[in-house]
Image (spheres, grey):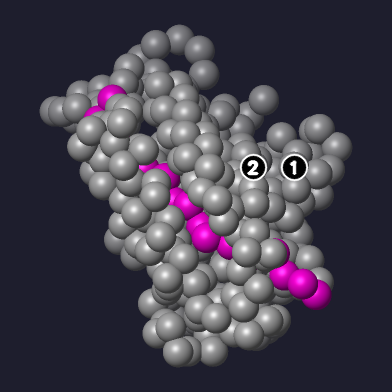
Amino acid sequence: MTHLHNQFQELLKLIDVEADVLTATRERLALARKVAAKHPEGRKSYSSGSIPAHTHIQPHSGSVSDGDGGIILNRVKHPSLGPDRDGEAPHDITDELVAFVAPQIRELYPKARVHKSRRGLKIYFCSPVDGTDVTVDLIVALQRRDGRGLWIPDLDKSAASKNAWSASDPVGHVELLNSAPDALRRTRRKAIRLLKAWNAQASKPGFSSHNLSVWAYEFITGGIGLVNSVHTVLEQASLRLQEGKPTKDPHGVSPDLKPLIPHDDAERRLRLAAAKLEEAIHDPDNIEAVQQALDYLFPKTMSEASNGFSAASRVRTTGQLGFAGPSLLIPKTRSWSSS
């Protein structure tokens, strides 16, 4: 194992979600789904996003940890809802669900607040776990009549807008990421976690987690290892943006995926990150080169890890401390989100 590979393994430990936070996220999502599914006009619920896809990471200080899921409405009781029927907007039924869910959540979490968000319900439990505010996003969804996937709301649009619904396939996306042989699936999950951590370093992330996951699904192949998997995604995504080619939804349900920042800025961010990591790949046992790559790709993570170990210096590795054996990142004993 090279020093670079070992450092990536240590990074995964640093960004791993604390066990208590992960448990709380799963439990609160399950609670929200159970409560919403009791609504007489709901049909079934589902989990989506990073938790069922196993690509969750610990947020930085002051962030929240979200559980993502949804409630699928009963079409029989909503014959007019959706673009493939009479075009009725989702605003009223979402208000009903907020009013239905909130008091039941507060039976267990008295300070909880439930609000209408862009896609459905946002549930604030107001009960932090190890300093992390664990919340739940619950999408209000409708099964599409023609084709796979769901109609999900865009409640930022007016109820009179024809764009108050958009097509998506959150369940299918999870199934996609959980596919492939075990070794490839494990490597892909780890690579997505590291890519999400890299993306989160910027004050304005350049890409959605879904976008990064789709690139990982497309570009990572078996047998290339974790470090090369991360580099491949950065490099190939940069080339795609340079060539002006679209990133398609793998299931062809939702629109093409686009960066969250201007195109040229997104391409440059990917290209420079790929180049810096490539320098370390060419000399994977060079402690200084590897450290420079880590400082460039993960500055916030490295800084917070360093501060967790010593507020007085930027000492980060056993090698720099003079201990024997391979130089490794020293993870703090508690996550940076802890108080």
Q: Which residues are magenta?
A: 130-146
The location of residue 44, given as percent across then percent down, is 64, 48
| Callout 1 amino acid | Asn
Q: Alpha-carbon neighbours of circle 2 within 10 Å: few (<14), some, or many (≥20)?
A: some
User: Of helix, strand and loop, which one carries label 1?
Assistant: loop
The residue labelled by disc 2 is: 53
Q: Nearer the viewer, residue 269 or 95?
A: 95
Can you say which quadrant of the picture contains the N terminus? top right
Q: Nearer the viewer, residue 256 or 306?
A: 256
Q: Main secondary structure of the magenta part?
A: strand
Query: In the image, 187: left or right of 29?
Result: right
The location of residue 226, given as percent across then percent down, is 67, 40
The residue labelled by disc 1 is: 178
Q: Alpha-carbon neighbours of circle 1 within 10 Å: few (<14), some, or many (≥20)?
A: some
Callout count = 2
| Image marks 1 and 2: residues in contact by CB distance under 8 Å | yes
| Callout 2 amino acid | Ala
Q: CA distance from mark 1 to mark 2?
A: 6 Å
